[in-house]
Image (spheres, helix red, strand yellow):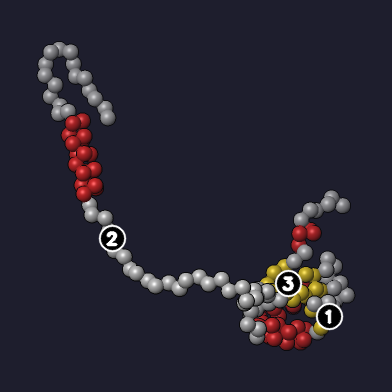
Amino acid sequence: MAMSGGSDDGSPMMEMNMTPLIDVLLVLLIMFIITIPVATHAINIDLPSPVNNPDTPEVEPIKNKIVLTQDGQILWNDQSISQGELVGNLQESLGFAVEPELQFEPEPLASYELAAEVLSIIKASGVTKFGFVGNERYRQFSAE
């Protein structure tokens, strides 16, 4: 806070000193904050207690892998299938209680057109657990 000293001519200072007033207001504000009652609204909910049941096995999701080869084949878990069989396999995998993870891995020289067709089939099927694998191999580009 700025303070003015006035002049040294002996005349009385005409401005009011605001520092004590502000100090009193801050003390009153703190007193009001302290005296506010604490909110004690509580809702009691009976939650179920956690049960460690080692008899139930953990559900491990199945992973299905689609590989596109450079000679135009679609491999479903290392078995060659057609696009029609791919649609059937995707619909069958959606019928499981836990949707299996679908991994998509085209070979480096696979047809881009085939990859686009397979990706559109996967998208149209409604698969939600989908991922690309093998891209980490192409992280480093060489200057060839």
- Kindly identify the residue that appears in the image at 71 percent across and 76 percent down: 62
**Front label number (2 vs 3):** 2
In the rendered structure, find residue 103 and report the number of the disc placed on it: 3
Q: Quadrant of residue 68?
A: bottom right
Q: Quadrant of residue 105?
A: bottom right
92 in relation to 41, above or below: below
In the rendered structure, find residue 79 and report the number of the disc placed on it: 1
Give the Cα distance between marks 3 and 1: 14 Å
**Place of residue 131 in the rendered image (x, y in percent of width and height, measured from the top left):** 69, 69
Three-letter amino acid code of the residue under disc 3? Gln
In this rendering, does residue 113 appear at all?
no
Three-letter amino acid code of the residue under disc 1? Gln
Give the Cα distance between marks 2 and 3: 52 Å
143 in relation to 7, above or below: below
Circle 1 SS class: strand
14 in relation to 128, above or below: above
Residue 55 horizontal side relative to residue 80, left or right: left
**Place of residue 58 in the rendered image (x, y in percent of width and height, measured from the top left):** 64, 74
- Kindly identify the residue that appears in the image at 22 percent across and 39 percent down: 26
**Place of residue 75 in the rendered image (x, y in percent of width and height, measured from the top left):** 82, 78
- Earlier along the polypeptide chain: callout 1 or callout 2? 2
Residue 49 horizontal side relative to residue 68, left or right: left
In this rendering, does residue 130 appear at all?
yes
Give the Cα distance between marks 1 and 2: 65 Å
Three-letter amino acid code of the residue under disc 2? Thr
Q: Please tell me how crowded label 2 is: few (under 14), some (14-19), or many (20+) other residues with Cα within 10 Å.
A: few
Circle 2 SS class: loop
- Earlier along the polypeptide chain: callout 3 or callout 1? 1
Q: Does the residue at mark 3 contact the one at mark 1 (Cβ under 8 Å)?
A: no
- Earlier along the polypeptide chain: callout 2 or callout 3? 2
**Front label number (1 vs 2):** 2
- Kindly identify the residue that appears in the image at 64 percent across and 79 percent down: 98
